[in-house]
Amino acid sequence: MELLTDDLLAGDIILLWRINFGTFTTETWFPKYFEYTYGTDAPKHLKTLVEKGYAGIETAFESLDHLNATMKKNILKKNGVTGLSKMKIADLDQALHNHFSEEELAGLFSIRGYKITPKGKHILKQYQDIVDRHPKKNL
């Protein structure tokens, strides 16, 4: 395993690449290739990427896109909000903003998204060749 800038490994670059899709959450499972191909303990390395400022954890409001409409309606229903059946996703998000503070909302669901920081985007761009060599699914 070759160390890159800031003691990063190729598996860390792939982890940042996955986070950059915008769908990586605290509940996302880690593919086995992190261990078997890149020799990294992905959960541990994810924590390190956050600590070094390459990635961050979204707030509750930023993580709303990881909840479906039913989950959002249930949160609002418990708070006594009516008229939920007519609401679309954007309306539900606005209602959540209107009825909850960040602290209140944070206690109502645990899933949080990960986001890549500008520092993470820079290192991802710097090591684009690692991403290019990584096997991709045929879509």
Image (spheres, helix red, strand yellow):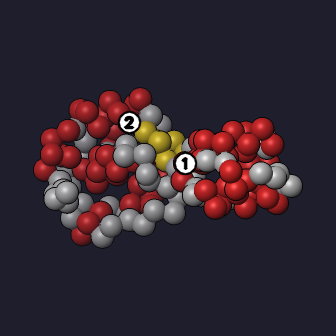
In the depicted view, which residue is nearer to us: 30 or 111? Answer: 111
Residue named by callout 2: 120
In the depicted view, which residue is nearer to us: 46 or 71? Answer: 71
Gap between marks 1 and 2, in whole Å? 21 Å
User: Is 74 above or below relative to 87?
Assistant: below
Between disc 1 and disc 2, the foreground one is: 1
Label 2 SS? helix
**Percent coordinates x, y for residue 118 in the rendering:** 41, 29
**Percent coordinates x, y for residue 100 in the rendering:** 79, 44
Quarter where residue 40 is shown: bottom left
Q: Is residue 130 visible?
A: yes
Label 1 SS? helix
In the depicted view, which residue is nearer to us: 30 or 88? Answer: 88
Q: Residues within 10 Å of mark 1 (few under 14, many from 20)?
A: some
Amino acid under label 1? Asp
**Percent coordinates x, y for residue 49 in the rendering:** 43, 46
Which residue sits at x=77%, y=51%? 83
The disc at residue 65 is 1
